[in-house]
Amino acid sequence: MALFLTFEFIASIFIVGGFFSNQPNEAKVLTLFGKYVGTCKKPGLNWCNPFYYRTKISLRKRNFNVDRIKVNDALGNPIEISAIVVWQVED
């Protein structure tokens, strides 16, 4: 009986240790000893092998604004240059 309870206790710790949650626009990259195993993109409560290392990644759109700068072209005319870079992580 004691052996069964010990096994049950160890199994319950193993099961509970694998639960994790994802927020909307968030994913987890699963790795085992540095090797890619998979990606979990479902929001909410999820379960995976508790030995997997889970790294959080944001899936929301991001942007980077470059300030406006004034330069001269080859003929000496002033030009204003600006840029906006938009990116999003995709699978």
Image (cartoon, rainbow, N blue to C red):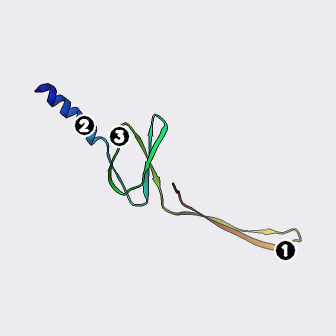
Q: Is residue 8 left or right of residue 38?
A: left
Along the line of sight, the residue nearer the viewer: 4 or 10: 4
Describe the element under mark 1 as helix, strand or loop.
loop
Labelled disc at residue 77: 1
Q: Residues under labels 1 and 2: Cα distance?
A: 71 Å
Of marks 1 and 3, the one in the foreground: 3
For marks 1 and 2 on the same chain, the one whose residue lies earlier in the sequence? 2
Describe the element under mark 3 as helix, strand or loop.
loop
For marks 2 and 3 on the same chain, the one whose residue lies earlier in the sequence? 2
Q: Residues under labels 2 and 3: Cα distance?
A: 12 Å
Location of the N terminus by quadrant is: top left
Q: Residue at x 35, y 40 (%)?
A: 49
Q: Residue furthest left?
A: 1
Q: Residue at x 72, y 69 (%)?
A: 81
Residue 54 location, x and y as percent?
41, 44
For marks 1 and 3 on the same chain, the one whose residue lies earlier in the sequence? 3
Q: Is residue 25 left or right of residue 15?
A: right
Along the line of sight, the residue nearer the viewer: 65 or 31: 31
> Residue under circle 2?
13
Q: Residue at x 15, y 25 (%)?
A: 3
At label 1, which amino acid type do we have? Asn
Describe the element under mark 2 as helix, strand or loop.
helix
Labelled disc at residue 49: 3
Q: Residues under labels 1 and 3: Cα distance?
A: 63 Å
Q: Residue at x 23, y 32 (%)?
A: 10
Residue 91 location, x and y as percent?
51, 54
At label 2, which amino acid type do we have? Ile
- Asked if 18 appears above or below 74 in the picture, the reply is above
Of marks 2 and 3, the one in the foreground: 3
Contact? badges 2 and 3 (CB < 8 Å): no
Contact? badges 1 and 2 (CB < 8 Å): no
